[in-house]
């Protein structure tokens, strides 16, 4: 991934880390979230103890909890970081063809998948409000 996209992700989520609302939301979770970006280097979030870290590359194999895996595009991430696109609109578009981000694996459907999507949506919302 070009450094500028990873840098944008790091800056965005660094602000999220400073939010007491985000810290409270993250305190309830120990999650790992992989972002696979079409044509770009992936990155992941490691959420635990009320904090998150952004790291380059793919998650190392093994370990718990099982990671959530999202696939997306550079354009979608840039729009999310800039506040031009809401996570809920990217994940739940009016038209299926407009899907910008997809949960592609690592977590089963149902409640656990919904919890992870809800957490990621909340972190993006908080980051966008802090812009």
Image: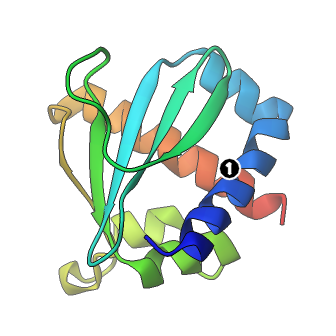
| Location of residue 112 with respect to 36 vertically, above or below | above
Who is closer to the viewer here, 21 or 82?
A: 82
Q: Could you say where residue 45 lies in the image, as x and y percent from the top left?
A: 49, 40
- Quadrant placement of the N terminus: bottom left
Q: Is residue 27 above or below residue 43?
A: above
Question: Tell me, what colour scheme is on the image?
Answer: rainbow
Quarter-wise, where is residue 79 in the image? bottom right
Q: Residue at x 45, y 84 (%)?
A: 75
Give the residue at x 21% y 28%.
Answer: 61
5 with respect to 101 (left or right): right
Residue for point 54% across, 28% down: 47
Q: How many marks?
A: 1
Residue 60 is left or right of residue 108, and the answer is right
The quadrant in which the C terminus is found is: bottom right
Residue at the spot 73% in from the left edge and 22% down from the top edge: 24
Q: Using the rendered view, name the quadrant where residue 23 is placed.
A: top right
Residue 11 percent coordinates (x, y): 74, 58
Q: Look at the numbered disc 1 and give the secondary structure of its residue.
A: helix
Which of the two residues, 48 or 83, is positioned nearer the viewer here?
Answer: 48
Q: Position of residue 78 (x, y in %)?
A: 56, 78
Taking the view exactly as shown, the residue that stands out farthest to the front is 3
Crowd around label 1: few <14 · some 14–19 · many ≥20 (10 Å): many
Report the residue marked by disc 1: 13
* For residue 91, side relative to residue 13 (left or right): left
């Amino acid at each position: 991934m070009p450094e500028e996209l990873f840098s944008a992700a790091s800056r965005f989520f660094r602000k999220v880390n400073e939010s007491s609302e985000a810290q409270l939301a993250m305190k309830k979770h120990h999650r790992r979230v992989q972002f696979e970006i079409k044509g770009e280097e992936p990155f992941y979030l490691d959420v635990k103890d009320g904090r998150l870290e952004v790291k380059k590359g793919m998650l190392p194999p093994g370990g718990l909890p099982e990671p959530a895996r999202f696939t997306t595009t550079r354009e979608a991430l840039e729009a999310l970081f800039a506040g031009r696109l809401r996570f809920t609109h990217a994940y739940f578009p009016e038209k299926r063809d407009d899907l910008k981000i997809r949960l592609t694996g690592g977590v089963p459907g149902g409640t656990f998948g919904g919890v992870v999507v809800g957490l990621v949506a909340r972190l993006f919302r908080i980051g966008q409000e802090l812009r």
